Amino acid sequence: MHALATDYAHAEGMLSSFWLLIAIPLASAAILLLAGRWADRWGHLLGCASVGVSFVLGLIYFLELRNLPADARNGGLSLFTFVPVADLRIDFGLLFDPLSALFVLLITGVGFLIHVYAIGYMAHNPPDQRHENSATTRRRFFGYFNLFVAAMLLLVLGNNYVILYIGWEGVGLASYLLISFWYLRPSATTAGKKAFLMNRVGDASFVIAIFLMFATVGSVGFATVFSEVDRMTSGVTLALGLLLLLGACGKSGQFPLQAWLPDAMEGPTPVSALIHAATMVTAGVYLIARSNPIFDANPTAQAFVVGVGVTTLLIGCVIGCAKDDIKRVLAWSTVSQIGYMFLGVGLGGAAYALAIIHLLAHGFFKAALFLGAGSVMHGMNDQVDIRRFGALWTYMRITWATFGVAWLAIIGIPPLSGFFSKEPIITAAFERPGWQGWVVGLGAMIGAGLTAFYMTRLFVLTFHGPKRWTDDIKHPHESPPVMTVPLIFLAIGSAVAGGLMATPVKDWLNPVFGVEGAAEAEPVLNHAAITLLSIVVTLVGALIGWWLFRDGTALEPQPAGPVVVAARNNLYLDAVNEALFEMPGKYLTRALVYFDNKGIDGLVNGLAAGIGGGSGRLRRLQTGFVRTYALSMLGGALLIAIAFLVVRLA
Amino acid sequence: MNPSYYVILAAALFTIGAVGVLIRRNAIVLFMCVELMLNAANLALVTFSRINGTLDGQIMAFFVMVVAAAEVVVGLAIIMAIFRTRRSASVDETNLLKY
């Protein structure tokens, strides 16, 4: 871009073709969306194959990257000059480095399993969507799905903020299309709009951050911006950090922009899995992790990230405890788990890698949970209320087993993934100096206990206890193999990924985050004590969950204390949004309409009426009598004569 | 004889004609009043010619006579046309061309 020293080395050999990672799903999306009914019969296979091929390619590039020496593990690629305007020159440049390599593997790997699952899940339209042929619906669905994956890959592979932003918006578009996929349901279209609008808030902030970068550095390339960080004033780094944080909050469903994420459940279940596990919500974490030099340069910005993370993870946990819709509980658990990741990237240093490890592990178990929930719904006539499940474990053994593994993984029971990915973040939280260590650490630990409680509640109510089914369900059935096989793979991933990744991924990522060796700070509590304590908290939470709900639950909502009522109402955060943003907006609009009608229209209409009325009166001068005209002529002639005389005499 | 008497006579004749045009209703009378005003103008032209000792005013009076003759032809034709359709020569009844 500008100077060679601030650019990434050009990718060599095999790596030089890594743009194919994006191009293949994008081409597939174009074919599926443009080919029409002609592609109905094989569209879903093409959709899966394109992501599968991308995954295989990603794996090859990953191995290629691993063969390079540790300090040369990045490959740049400049496809063409995207924006050549005077001083501003933005290349359509891509970057394949250890961080983006891991994201590519997660997006295409978990994404591929979700794609395969969707073949089975989308085979038949739900009863209220029979206006369209199922095969056509499914082809359209896979088109959007591939677009989603392509946009997300562009997001993680860009080598400057503008390319990242293009992917960022592409993800927003694809999520809008998929959340409101059942476009005949008003709730689905509203949820799509809500997601899009709330994302817009974050996007605007991100765009301002890009403008600020260009204003201060004159470039938007990662390498150039990061090399200039030392020369920025602390005001600039704080502004950049906060703007990027708000952008990340929008995409990742973090406080204060978390409200869209649970509503995104209106889309088909594989969409939820893709949004929550592999794409979209991880984008915010990626953005902050990628911008690590900016955040490292400003501890205040980092403190804000930590604050957002802890607040969100507690909000997510508390609301998750009070919801009865299986997908909504999972959605709030995503909000809370992403909160852990924000906490990790906010802590900085070695915790960046911890956050990414948690993100990858979360990708597996959250995908398994969502797809498991989809499988339960598939067998139960699309019922989503956990009060109407129960005793399903004998009917859907594979779903039960895989869901169980993912459940143990998310609550962090050793030796499953969650333990290896979440517990280090809690430990790192305690490493913050002074009172912050206690507040943040205890917040994260309470979150872990609450997570154990509500996930156990979800699991026990769904699969165990007495049957509480609606009358129309006689024999729940297990899903077809095309759905259960991805579940098995994801369950295996949930079980072992965390343990396998914990150490190597840290070493793999540390060069990206500029962390040399492990100079760990002294936590306010002993390491072993923290680990022990978090396991105890988790077990206690899970035991309470099991004890309270082992015999099922009432079928109707029960009266509850103020905390539970608040949690059922999303802690009134939607109401706050409504009061703070929606109502003033409405009143402003009404005032403007009033001003337009009465003020502007009044002026224009008044002028017209004045001229019309005046000319109506002037018209009366035309009487039609000859003598009137004769008199006016005489008067005129006299006036002229008098004027002459006056001029003469004067 | 003092030429200014002729000028005063011309002014008086013109005023009578103008007032007649303004207040009379019969088209023929109106028309005669117009002729009166033209002849008052002619008298004034001839008088000024005499006062200044040039012939310009007298030549101008001839022109006015020619125009007046042509005007009489057209004007009487219009009055005849109106009278045939309306059976009346009152100018107050031909007031359709108005607001």
Image: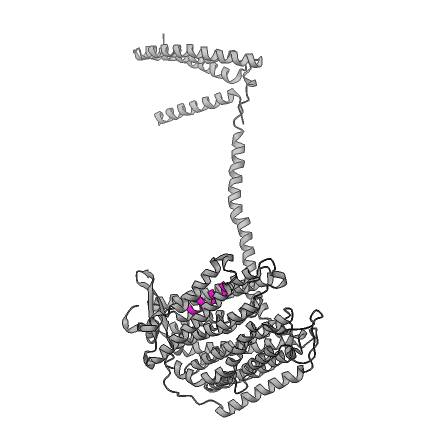
Check the picture and name the quadrant holding the N terminus of chain B.
top left
Residues drawn in magenta: A142-153
Task: Locate residue A178, reporting x and y percent.
Answer: 53, 64
Left or right, A526 with reference to A62: right
> Mostly what secondary structure, the magenta segment?
helix
| Colouring rule applied to residues | one colour
Q: Is residue B88 above or below residue A308?
A: above
Left or right, A83 with reference to A320: left
Task: Locate residue B62, reporting x and y percent.
Answer: 36, 9
Furthest toward the left, the residue is A4
Left or right, A385 with reference to A259: right
- Magenta span includes A152: yes
Furthest toward the right, the residue is A471
Q: Does the image show residue A422?
A: yes
Q: Is residue A644 above or below residue A241?
A: above
Task: Locate residue A397, reporting x and y percent.
Answer: 61, 79
Residue ID at (55%, 78%): A314
Number of numbered discs on residues? 0
Check the picture and name the quadrant holding the C terminus of chain B.
top right
Q: Does the image show residue A253?
A: no
Task: Locate residue A142, reporting x and y percent.
Answer: 50, 64
Q: In this view, does B60 lie above or below A10?
A: above
Furthest toward the top, the residue is B1
Task: Depth check: give the residue in front, A217 or A480.
Answer: A480
- Magenta span includes A115: no
Residue ID at (30%, 68%): A1
